Image (cartoon, helix red, strand yellow):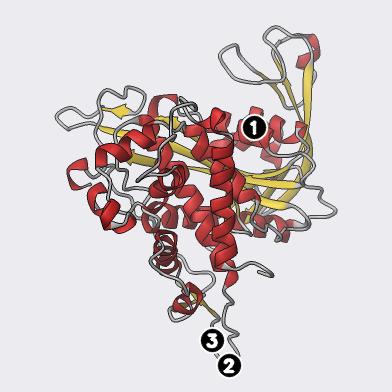
Amino acid sequence: MKNFTPDLIKKNLFDSIDLLFSEKSKYLYDPEKDFSRTQKISFRDSMLFPMILSSESTAIEMLDYFPIETLPSQAALSYRRGQIKVTAFRDLFKTFTSKLPQYRTFRGMRLIACDGSRINTPYNPKDTDSFVNCIKGRKGFNQYHLNTCYDVLNDLYLDAMIQGYFSMNENQAFCEMMDHFPQEIPALFTADREYDSYNVIAHAIKNNHHFVIRLTSTKVRCIFDDISKYDSSESFDIEDDIYIGRVRNKESKHLRNYHFIRKHRTYDFIPDGAAYFDCLHVRLVKLRLPGGDFEYLLTNLPRSDFPLSDIKEIYRLRWQVETSYRFLKYASEMNSIHSIKPDFVFQEIFAKLTTYNFCAAIMKCTHPDDPGEKKYKYEPEKTYLIKICMRYLKGKLDDILNLISKRKVPVRAGRRFSRNIRRQHADTLQYR
């Protein structure tokens, strides 16, 4: 990454934090009094501390971060964090990310995967939006849903929304994040089967974005009236129009692929009772996978410029968002939440997203080994790199590039593993 060094990336992070403090009227609950005295805990410390938290207790984490001679109490740190609004951590995440180079594209478009992941937090039955107690005889748990837009080729999280278990709506979150994404930047959004709603498709088209969304065979038959005539084909690539409306009348009866949206269903572009229709031009692709299964992908990419091989490659690249969640939640320690207060939980989640992007930027400063006569090329082990970067933020390490270069792993393309499904749980706060 030309002209970028770990020290410059770290400086950009600190400058972003200082910029927030210069606008403290937006980010502090009482800007006249909050942080007027910073003998032990500054605003920068309060923003950085959630970024470097690991699975140790808060007391141990404070020993690692603060100088022993000025070590504050846990109550003082909690008091300082309580003076800062969640929006400060969200805006730090976005401001810092905007300063990082994002130069890799797919045919001139940012390749963005939208997905979600559940985050279990310490037991707090008072938080009714996240507390789940649905199994008789078993203690409940708290769970939030993290919705993200992830730049696949640049390994960066660009946007995020946090929803409680009972307010979770992935499609709504996807639509809002697409609306926030600048229209002047060409973007190609990819998503899995949970995002195959007409509202999502309409938001992408009306915001001048492209998309590739996976569909189930059942959904395909619901969308297209005469799809049965293609069932015998191992692969196909067709273009058609979908009509969306809120009324049933004589005109709608003569429309192919017409879909009536009921009152309780969300479609943001036609109010209830309106007599007009939306026409969405889409392309449906059927692909045969190496294992023999079939996949259906819905897109608005032009067939003349994006053949089947490109569509298949785009969706293959989408899987990297699943891998990134593993590093975000386990290597960056997002799963180890240190508080039960919802605002503090949100602070830690946005802080860990910033940590992940910080580490991803430093990884770009390293150079993969030229394989030469070797079977694989080698790059830094990501978990090890993240742990080093967190210590670098604490000020414990200096020459981290030399340290990172000593531990590299081979890049093995095309590896497949079965998913390890585990029962939902969260570690209790008595260990943190």
Q: Residue at x 40, y 25 (%)?
A: 166
Q: Secondary structure at mark 3?
A: loop
Left or right position of 61 against 343: left
Q: Nearer the viewer, residue 328 or 288?
A: 328
Q: Is the residue 67 above or below the residue 213 in the image?
A: below
What residue is shown at x 27% (from left), y 22% (from top)?
A: 126
Which quarter of the figure has residue 318?
bottom right
Query: What is the secondary structure assignment of the residue under circle 2?
Result: loop
Instruction: Give, as a three-letter code, the residue at label 2.
Output: Glu
Give coordinates of residue 242: x percent, y percent: 74, 29
Q: Which residue is mark 3?
A: 375
Question: Mark 2: few, some, or many residues within 10 Å (few <14, many ≥20)?
Answer: few
In the image, what residue occupies the spot 36% across and 55% down?
330
C-beta proximity under 8 Å, tags 1 and 3: no
Q: Amino acid at mark 1?
A: Val
Residue in front for this viewpoint, 342 or 105: 342
Which residue has dot 1 on it?
200
Answer few, some or many: residues within 10 Å of disc 1's Cα (few below 14, many 20 plus, some between 14 and 19).
Answer: many
Q: Position of residue 186 (x, y in %)?
A: 77, 47
Image coordinates of residue 156 in percent, x first then y, are: 58, 54
Label 3 crowd (10 A; few <14 / some 14-19 / many >=20): few
Residue type pointed to by label 3: Lys
What residue lies at 48% left-to-right and 58% top-to-bottom? 323
The answer to whether 135 is drawn above or below residue 5 in the figure is above
First-in-chain label (2 vs 1): 1
- Position above or below: 259 against 105: above
Secondary element under disc 1, as helix, strand or loop, is helix
Tell me the distance, in whole angstroms, between the alpha carbons under discs 2 and 1: 47 Å
Rendered image: mark on residue 373: 2
